Amino acid sequence: QVQLEESGGGLVQAGGSLRLSCAASGRTFSSSAIGWFRQAPGKEREFVVGISWRGGSTLYADSVKGRFTISRDNAKNTVYLEMNSLQPEDTAVYYCAATPLLRVPRASAGYNYWGQGTQVTVSS
């Protein structure tokens, strides 16, 4: 069982930066791959980035490559999402999710546990 809680969202101007955190509790966090997803109003939830349980493997959506960076600190049970050069199209609720799979799934169905989400709003 893993419980997840996102934080760090907010309002930022285009070109700005935010760092999201996904804090986890539960014995299996350090053996779980973690993914970040986002959902904009009227759109489906989409995969943003994921990281394997040891952090050695990452997977990014094309739309965020070069701008977003994922990292994890298993000692702190936390995964971070550094978001730079934010654009209005990045506006969404951002969710972190956990999976016991060794690889990082792109599909939301591959994840067992989800946080409640944190709002990111980028103004133009």
Image (cartoon, grey):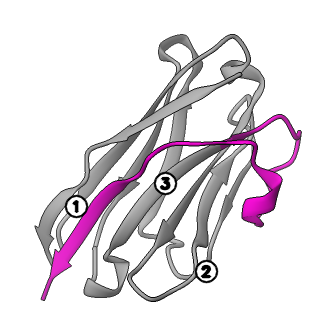
Circles 2, 3 touching at the beta carbon (< 8 Å): no
Among the two numbered marks 2 and 3 on one chain, the one whose residue lies closer to the N terminus: 2
| Residue occupying image coordinates x 54% and y 72% | 65
| Residue occupying image coordinates x 41% and y 79% | 40
| Distance between mark 2 and mark 3 Cα atoms | 18 Å
Relative image position of residue 83 (x, y in whole percent): 35, 60
Q: Secondary structure at mark 1?
A: loop
Q: Nearer the viewer, mark 2 or mark 3?
A: 3
Disc number placed over residue 17 in the picture, else none:
1
Report which residue position mark 2 lands on.
Answer: 62
Residue 4 included in the magenta stretch of the image: no
Q: Count neighbours of disc 1 (C-alpha within 10 A) and say few if under 14, some if 14 to 19, many if 20 or more.
A: some
| Residue occupying image coordinates x 53% and y 82% | 63
Name the residue type under label 3: Tyr
91 on left or right of 80: left
Q: Which residues are magenta?
A: 98-124
Q: Secondary structure at mark 2?
A: loop
Name the residue type under label 1: Ser
Relative image position of residue 29 (x, y in whole percent): 67, 22
Disc number placed over residue 95 in the picture, else none:
3
| Distance between mark 1 and mark 2 Cα atoms | 18 Å
**Quadrant (top left, top right, bottom left, bottom right) of the N terminus:** top right
Q: Count neighbours of disc 2 (C-alpha within 10 A) and say few if under 14, some if 14 to 19, many if 20 or more.
A: few
Tell me which corner region of the image, top left, top right, bottom left or bottom right, holds residue 28.
top right
Circles 1, 2 touching at the beta carbon (< 8 Å): no
Task: Look at the picture and state if 110 lies above or below 44.
Answer: above
Among the two numbered marks 3 and 1 on one chain, the one whose residue lies closer to the N terminus: 1
57 on left or right of 62: right
85 on left or right of 110: left
